[in-house]
Image: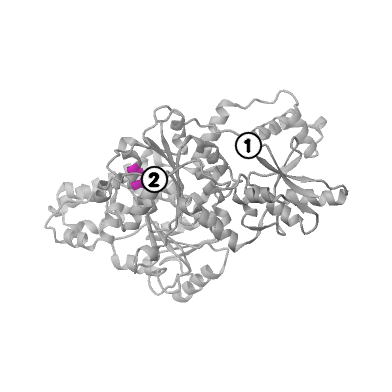
Amino acid sequence: MITIQKIDNGFYIKSFLTDSSDFNRYVEACRKYHLSFDNIKKGYTNSNPKILLEVVDELGDEFDVFVKESIRKEIDEYNPYIPSFKPRRLKIEKSFFEKFPPKGDYQIEDATRMACYGRFGNFNKQGTGKTYESIQAVNQMLFHKLIDKVLIVVIPVLTYNWKREMLEFSNLFSEEDFLIITESNREKIYEKDLPKIVITSYDTFRLCSDYAYKQENPYKPFTKIIKPIEKYCEDNKIDISKTTEEQLEKINKKLYNEKVKNYRKEQLDFSWWGDNRLIILDESHKIKNMSARRTQILHKHKHFFDYRFCLTGTPHPQGVQDLYSNLKFLDDNLVDSDYVSFLHTLGEVGNGFSKYALASIDEEKANKFLERIRPYYCRRFLRDVVKDLPEVIWKPIYIPFEGMQKQIYQSIVNEELTTLKEEKGVIKYKDLIVKFPYMMSVLSDPLLVADKILEFGGLKNWKFEDSLKFKTANSLIDSILEDGDEKIVIWEEHPDTIDRLGKAFEKYNPICISGTTTPKGREKYEWRDEQINKFKTDKKVKILIANPTTLGTGTNLQFVRHVIYFSRNADFVNWDQSVSRTERIGMVGDVIYYILIMDNSLDVHMDTILKDKETLDRLFLKQGLTTKDCKDIFAGVRISQ
C-alpha cells in the first residue's frame, strides 16, 4: 500500500510494498516528479504537497493507495505560493506624471502597480513604454523613500539608453548619479562609492562576479597530484603516470576554471550600498534558462535587493514554462522550488529528448497558473492600448561618443566650418547640409576619411572593428540571433562600409547590395531580386546589408522583424521608403527598428530632422547660422528659433 502521512508539519509519501519490482516502479514514479527522499522521515516529499497528491493518485491506477480525507482536504486547501512580500498602498505623487506625461492612463496604472508591489514583472509588448513605466515607478519609490539605490541590468546596447531616458523622464537625477559599468571599467563595481544608479550588462555582471571569486580564491599553480586531478585523468582515460608536469599544469588550470564557473554563493557584496535597493532586469527573457550562468549568478545576488522588476516584451516565447525564472527572480515563493516540480504543475513531463522536458501543457492547469500570478505582472499589447498604430517599435540606440573617433570627428567639423565661413561669409543651412555625408562618415566608418586618420599618429593600426557603431551593431546582432532564427536588415549609405560590414559579419552569410555590387554581365534588378529571394528562403543567410537608395523602393521585406540603421542621410524620402520595406501588408510580426545614434553628434540632429519636418523647414528658412548654431547642430543640441 502507498499513502501520504503528515509528520512535523510536512507531508511524505510512504510505501509499504514488499515486491521488489513494485517498489522499483514506485521509486521511478517518485523520481519522475522530482521528489526528494527524506532519510529521517523515510518518505518522498516536495515543497508543494499538491504534487504528492498527484503522484499518489497516479499510482492508484497500479497500486493500492490510501489518503485520509483530512489530509487530502488539508493538501487541497494548502497554498504553497504565498509570496514573501506584500503590496503597499501608496499615495501617488501626481507631479511626476504632470511633468512627464504618459501615452495613456494605462502607463499610470502600470507604474503605480510596480511601485506598490515592489516586485513586479512588466511583460507588456514592445512599444508600450515599459522603460517609461519603470522610471515612473522609480520616481514614486524614491519620493516615498522606499529605495535609495538602483541597479539596472540590460543587454549591452541599452546601457546608455537607460541613462538617457532616466534623465529624460525624471527630475530626481543628475549626471553624477549614474555609473555605467562595462568590461573595461568593471573594477568600479568593487569600489565603496557607487552612485545612486548603476547600469551594467548581463555578461559584465557575470564577469564582475567571476573576478570577485578569483580574487578571493586565486589560482594555485600545480605542485602535486591531488584527488581532483586523479579523478579527471580517470574519467578521461588519461594515464597519469605518463603525463608531464606541463600537462598536469593544464589539467590543474582547467579544473580551476571549471570551479570558477560553479561557485555556489554570491560573490559581489551589495549590503553596504544604501539601505533599500531596487534591481531592474531589462530584456529579462535573457534569464529564462535556469542552467545559464548569467541566470544563476543573478539569482545568487537577488537577496541584496528587496525590490525587483523584470521587464520583457517576450516573457514566454516557447510557452508559459518560460516564466519560471523571471517569477522566481521576483520571489522564490511565487513558483515551485525546482523547475521540474514546476513543470508538473503545468502538464505532462518527459519526452523523447529528455525526461525532464515539458511534453504537453494542460490548458486548465496553465490557465490556473496564469490566474494565480496575475497580480504580480502586467501584459498589454500595443494595439490594445494605442489605437490605430501599426505594430512598429522604434529603438534608438544612443552610443557614448568618446576616444579617438570623437577627436577625428571634432577635427573634421572644425576644419569644414572654417572653410565654409571663409568661402561663404554667412553660413546657411543649405550650404551646411551638403557637408553632412562627409562629416557623418566618421560616425559610422572612420576608414572613409583615411586621409584624416593619418594625421592622428595613434591610428596607424585602426581597423573597421574599432568603430564604436560596429561594436554596438555586433553586440546587438549577437543578441537578436541568440534568441531565435531571425532575419536582419542593415541599412548603410556607403558602399565601402557595406563591403566592410559584409566581411565583418561573414559568419552570418550576409548578402550585400549597393550600387557597385552587381556582378559584371548581370542585369542589376534581376540579380537583386535573386539576392532578395535567397535572403528570404536560405536559412543560412541571416543578414541583408544594403543601401536604402539602391534597395529602398520596389522591394518587399515584410518577412524581416529586425532592421538596423547603421547610418542615415537627410533625405526624408529615402528614409520613409526604407521604413516601408518592412512595414507593410504581410508582416510576420512586430518590426523593431534600431537606430544607431552617436550621442552628442550630428547623428542626433539627423534623427531630429527626419522625425520633425518643421525643424528642417525652419532651418532652411533661417537667414544665417551663428557659430553657436553650427556647433549645436554638430553636437546634437536643438538650436534655438
Q: Which residues are magenta?
A: 134-140
* Magenta: main secondary structure: helix
Task: State the scheme by which the image is colored.
Answer: one colour
Q: Which residue is mark 1?
A: 262
| Position of residue 307 measured from the top left corner of the image (x, y, whole percent) | 44, 40
124 in relation to 297, above or below: below
226 in relation to 340, above or below: above
Q: Quadrant of the C terminus?
A: bottom left
Q: Nearer the viewer, residue 433 or 364?
A: 364
Q: Secondary structure at mark 1?
A: loop
Separation of residues labelled 1 and 2 (CA atoms): 36 Å
The numbered dot on residue 389 is: none
Residue 138 sits inside the magenta stretch: yes
Q: Which residue is mark 2?
A: 116
Whether residue 86 can be seen here: yes
- Seen as rendered, the residue at the extreme front is 70
Left or right: residue 544 versus residue 350 is: left
User: What's under tag 2, amino acid-wise?
Assistant: Cys
Disc 2 packing (10 Å; few <14; some 14–19; many ≥20): many
